[in-house]
Amino acid sequence: MAGVLRIHFTRQDLLLMQLAGQSDPMWEAVLGTHVLVAPAGRLTPRLSAWKANARRKIDPEVRSACRLLMDLAPADASYFPDFLTPIEAMEGLDAGLDALRSTPRSRIRDELGFASKRRALPNWACSLARGEGEAMQDVARSFQVINDRLIRPDWTQVAAALEMDRSQRLSALERSFSSLLDSMYPFTWNDPVLSAPYPMDWDIRLGGRGICFIPSYFCDGSPVAIVDPKLPPVVVYPLQVASRRTAHDEALGALLGDNRAKVLVSLRTASTTGDIAAMAGLRPSVVSGHLKILRNAGLVESERQGQHVLHTLTPRGAVLTTENNPG
C-alpha cells in the first residue's frame, strides 16, 4: 500500500542540511536495475532512452549481477537493506565497496531480518546473514559489473543532468531554505515537515542531526531514504533535468518536430552533445543527427574546445527560440 515519507526538521537541521555535489555510484547501480524492469510507459523519456541502450549491453555476466542485486533490493520493495548503500560510496565506488565488505555481521543479520518481514528473501541470503565472505564478495562484484558495464559508459549525460539539477537547487537555496525544499520534486514542504509519496508510511525525525540530499539520475518517482535511525540521515531524490515546456516550445515542436525542437531549445545555453542528451531525454546518437540538420539550416554552430565539442545557437537560432519575439 502506498504511504508517505515525512521528514521532520528543526531549525538546526536546516542549517546542517547538505546537497551532495554528485550522485552515489551504489545508489545508482541499485536504482539503475530498477529502471531496467520498470514498465516502459512509466519512465521519463531520458530513462526510457537509457533503458533501451542498456538492454542491448546485457549478457550473462550483467544479467547475473542485476538478478543478484534485485534479489536483495527489488524494484517494488518498501525497504531494502541499508548496508547496500554505505555513505562512504560518496567518496567513490571503491570506498563504497570497501565499506560494504566491512559491514559488521550483526548489522547484516539485523537488516536482512527487517527486510524478511516485508518479503521473502532468496535462499542464498542466509549465507550473507551468517557473514560468509564469498556471499558478500558476490554482492560487491555485482555492483562493480553494473557500474562498469551499464552506468559508467553513459556518464557524460548523467553528469550533465546532475550538474543541471545542482544548479537549480543552489539557485533556489540562494532565495531561502524554504525555496530549496519547495523546489525538490516530488516533495512538499509544510514547515517543519518535508513529505513525499513513499512505498510505506515512514517518519524521519532529524532531531538536529541534519540531512544529506543525494541526487540520482536513475531514481524514478518516489525518493529513497536510509531507514536505520542510527545511520546519518540520507535521502536520494530524482533529478529534475527538464523545465516545463512553454507554449512557445510547443509551437517549435509543431514546426520542427518534437525531438529536434527539444535539441534546439536545450541550446539556450551552450551545451555539449551529452548535455543536450540529458536535457532532452534522447540518445547522444539521435542528438548528433538533429544537430547536423540544425547546423545545415544555420541555426546552430559547433566548436571544439579541448576534449569536447560545444554547441551554441547562431543569431538566427536564438531568434527562433526567443519567446514573445515580435518579428
Image: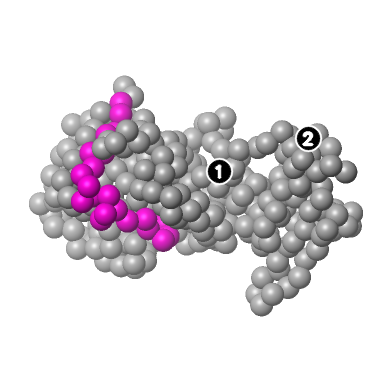
Q: Residue at x 75, y 56 (%)?
A: 288
Q: Which of pointers 2 and 1 lies earlier in the amino acid sequence?
A: 1
- Against 25, is 265 above or below? above
Q: Residue at x 77, y 47 (%)?
A: 321
Disc 2 secondary structure class: helix
Label 2 to label 1: alpha-carbon separation = 25 Å
Dot 2, how many residues are within 10 Å of its Cα: few (below 14), some (14-19), or many (20+)?
A: few
Toward which corner of the image does residue 316 lie, by quadrant? Answer: bottom right
Left or right of 57: which side holds 141? left
In the image, is residue 5 part of the stretch drawn in magenta?
yes
Question: Is 22 or 14 nearer to us in this picture?
Answer: 14
Disc sitting over residue 251 in the figure: 2
Amino acid at pointer 2:
Ala
Q: Residue at x 33, y 24 (%)?
A: 2
Give the residue furthest to the bottom: 306
Q: Position of residue 299 (x, y in %)?
A: 84, 55
Disc 1 secondary structure class: helix
Q: Position of residue 250 (x, y in %)?
A: 74, 34
Disc sitting over residue 97 in the figure: none
Which range is magenta?
3-23
